[in-house]
Amino acid sequence: MTTAMHSSPAVPEAAPVPGDTTASRAAHAGEPLVTRYDAVRTHTLRLCATLQTEDFVVSSMPDVSPTKWHLAHTSWFFETFVLAEHAPDYRSPDPRYAFLFNSYYVQAGERHCRAQRGLVTRPTVAEVFAYRAHVDEAMHRLLERVGADAAHPVVPLVELGLQHEQQHQELLQTDIKHVFWTNPLRPSYHSGPRSRHGAPEPVRWRAVPEGVHRIGNEEKEEFSFDNERPAHRVFLESFALADRLVTNGEYLAFIEDGAYDEPALWLSAGLATVQAEGWTAPMYWERTADGWTEFTMHGQNAVDTAAPVSHVSYYEADAFARWAGSRLPTEPEWEVAARMHGTSLHQAYDQCWQWTQSAYVAYPGYTPPSGAIGEYNGKWMADQWVLRGGSRATPPGHARLTYRNFFPSATRWQFTGIRLAEHT
């Protein structure tokens, strides 16, 4: 089946890249590290401003961690990887926190079971906030000693910790959304009415000619995770990328065409998952007597047909692309097109992470860092797909052109959406 999403591709001049970290580097140039530390840590607390104490402690499924755990784990990260090594006088308020708030760093010690994080009522929420304050005080003392010494070994560890906390800022929001969705009262995370999207423009296809391109991160002066390196060359056949994301209205047409019941559209594992889970629409959608509704951060609302579709799995994204007569882009195609077309590739970083058809594997020449830090990305390079871009929950300044997000095929609780590609 095809939709009315096709128009002629075009190849413009190379344009500025939205989400490029050049601007964020300039913004942080000359800024004391402690100032950036405080800004990131404060933003985490700001995300909790609308929550009540009871909201902090719930885990609604194994993938969802309680808000309290996110607050503690990000503090544990600085305690374990920065303070323990570089602040000999530091003492944890409770050594048992290391067991409770380690996530998956095997080399850092034993860990509490992820699926049981919501069963841990102590430490209390107040004690977790006190733990954060305790870590912050120690970090301030350490960063005052470091001062403006950019070559100090603490600096890259702190930057990694801040980037790690920004990842958890996004997880905190997607997790609390799932928690609120499981509550029959369907509470709102944000106050006030939800803004609606204007009518979408017809899709324009941004063409990229065949050739050899360089992808990955090679700028030494900017932060990048180890999985974004090393930069390397790839050959791409000519292709085109849709200039915007697939909308709820377009996905609704997919649903109404009976696509969830059409085996020819689905990967085998995808069809098995759809049938086993009873999926008939994106996560958070419900069919009512008055039509489809969607649970959002503003509570339950009628589906905004102009908004980008979100909370779809890789399986659903792949099936939709096949139904639409297109396909998902590969990871290199997404990066090359985003670099070439810049701001004319709309909704790249501020709406939904975009599934690619690229498996999450190491780049050629990749070597993970030594020690427990090396477990951050490298050990997950199996049975997952790369997503590119960023979402409405991604913190300001965190997204970048070379960022590689990754999740398993059936993931839906994240802000995951669809951008189409086609051969030319």
Image (cartoon, rainbow, N blue to C red):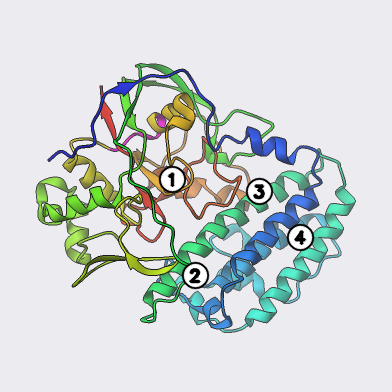
Q: Which residue is mark 3?
A: 160
Alpha carbon distance from label 1 to label 2: 33 Å
Q: Residues within 10 Å of mark 3 (few under 14, many from 20)?
A: some
| Residue 179 place in picture, x, y as percent | 43, 73
Q: Which residue is mark 2?
A: 189
| Residue 226 place in picture, x, y as percent | 57, 40
Q: Amino acid at mark 1?
A: Met
Alpha carbon distance from label 2 to label 3: 28 Å
Question: Where, quadrant-wise, is the C terminus in this rendering?
Answer: top left
Q: Amino acid at mark 2?
A: Tyr
Mark 1 vs mark 2, foreground winner is 2
Q: Residues within 10 Å of mark 1 (few under 14, many from 20)?
A: some
The residue segment tinted magenta is 328-332
Is residue 89 rendered to the left or right of residue 364? right
Q: Amino acid at mark 3?
A: Leu
Mark 4 vs mark 2, foreground winner is 2
Examine the structure image and report whether residue 330 is included in the region drawn in magenta: yes
